Image: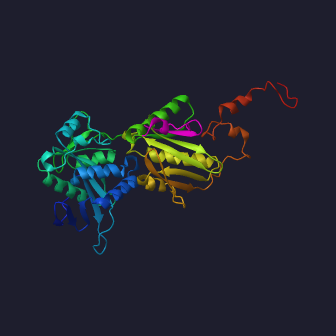
Amino acid sequence: MLAALSEPPIHSESPERLETAEAFVRRFEDQDVESGAALAASHLPEAAVPVGLLQQVRRHNADSLWGIFPKGPQGEILPMAGFCSFLILNHRGATALMRGTFDAHKIDFDYLAPNPETACVLYVWAILGKGLSASIVSLINQVMVRRYPGRPLYTRAATEAGLRFMQRSGYVPIHRESPGIGAVHRRVGQRVDLPPTPRLAKRVLKVVPVSTAEEFEKALAIRHVFLSEQSCPYHEEFDGNDRTGTHFLGFVDGEPAATLRVRYFADFVKLERLAVLPRFRRTLIAKEVVTAAVNFCRRKGYRRCVGHAQEHLVRFWQKFGFQPTPRDYVLTFSDRDYIEMYGDFEPDPRAITIETDPYVMIRPEGRWDEPGILERSAGRPAVNPCNGRQP
């Protein structure tokens, strides 16, 4: 994660807020929670956090969430553009972190300290500072260290860039034998010189339409995250529609990571059941799966897609051209509210129509540009020839 780079001049500071020439920073207030969740959903969709969970973390310890508000040309305070969040761990939480059993995606509130007196460790949970100076985040870190003296800063890197930044900023792995992405790091100073880390290979993302029983089972297994994270009843998650549409399966470095379901209606399709395993939510696999599904539907000739999104994910779907429907319909099922959304897309110039080569129509779904097994079988003579053709 981010850490100290330089010391920006502080104009003012209080336990709850601070100000520099570049930005105004303060602890989250009630109205900031939804904005923070929306920012995360927009810029870190794979790691989006429900508004309710953020509210719980903030109420447990108000020092956990800090909003960054840039200043305009005249020094006016602009809307929140970033944040820095911490999980302030008590002794039990610190022990779980050291033992490798602490999961920052599933918050156990028994691990969190409500005040400095019971805090043992400051865990940097998430940082969003797009377009902002890293020194602003550094300043928040410094304020937290002063508020929690003697409590060390720990974090994990989710990307190769984050890992390099951590190394430049004074973080070292607590276990030297495992220094890479996902390993716990502790901040030990402003800057340290470490041996060069071997460059990590770029993560390989792949999306396929499900075509085998094994792929179908993998897609359904991924969706079990809804049963645990959202307490969705089994018979509501697996609603009887899984064998009526097309499923997509996303892989990260060959590992099943995400899935999405498409169902077909007369002149539109419905995208639903998008799920990403927690350890892959900081990759771009969600984006790849949605893009592949939309392009697949366009190739089939569809121009309109609809879907239902929880409020904190509306911005994520807007990135693909979806918008709330004009009737502004909100529906409730499985104990959650959903906003009805739709997207209109340009037709694919290669869209399959009734005039398309019939051999293309019988190719495997999604592989319309390569000869299929039935097409290759046409080289054998027919056993029931038409129009007097000889076998």
Residue at (85% x, 29% y) in the render = 389
Q: How many marks?
A: 0
- Image coords of residue 185 (percent x, y): 23, 42
Front residue of 31 and 204: 31
Span of residues in magenta: 232-252
> Which residue is more in the foreground, 20 or 370?
20
Q: In this view of the protein, can residue 126 be seen by the observer? A: no
Taking the magenta stretch, the answer to whether it contains residue 233 is yes
Q: Quadrant of residue 255?
A: top left
Question: Residue 19: x, y in percent?
Answer: 21, 66
Residue 31, given in percent of the width and then of the height, sits at 32, 61
281 horizontally vs 333: left or right: left
**In the displayed structure, does residue 90 sit left or right of residue 249?**
left
Residue 236 % position (x, y): 48, 39
Please identify the residue farthest to the bottom as the structure is shown: 74
Instruction: Relative to 114, say whether 233 is above or below.
Output: above
Residue at the image point whose x is 27% and y is 73% from the top: 75
Residue 33 magenta-drawn? Answer: no
Could you say which quadrant of the image residue 15 lies in?
Answer: bottom left
The quadrant in which residue 345 appears is bottom right
64 vs 360, nearest the viewer = 64
- Residue nearest the viewer, comparing 234 with 7: 234
Q: Is residue 118 visible?
A: yes
Quadrant for the C terminus in the image: top right
Extreme residue in the right direction: 388
Residue at x 26%, y 65% (from the top left corner): 23
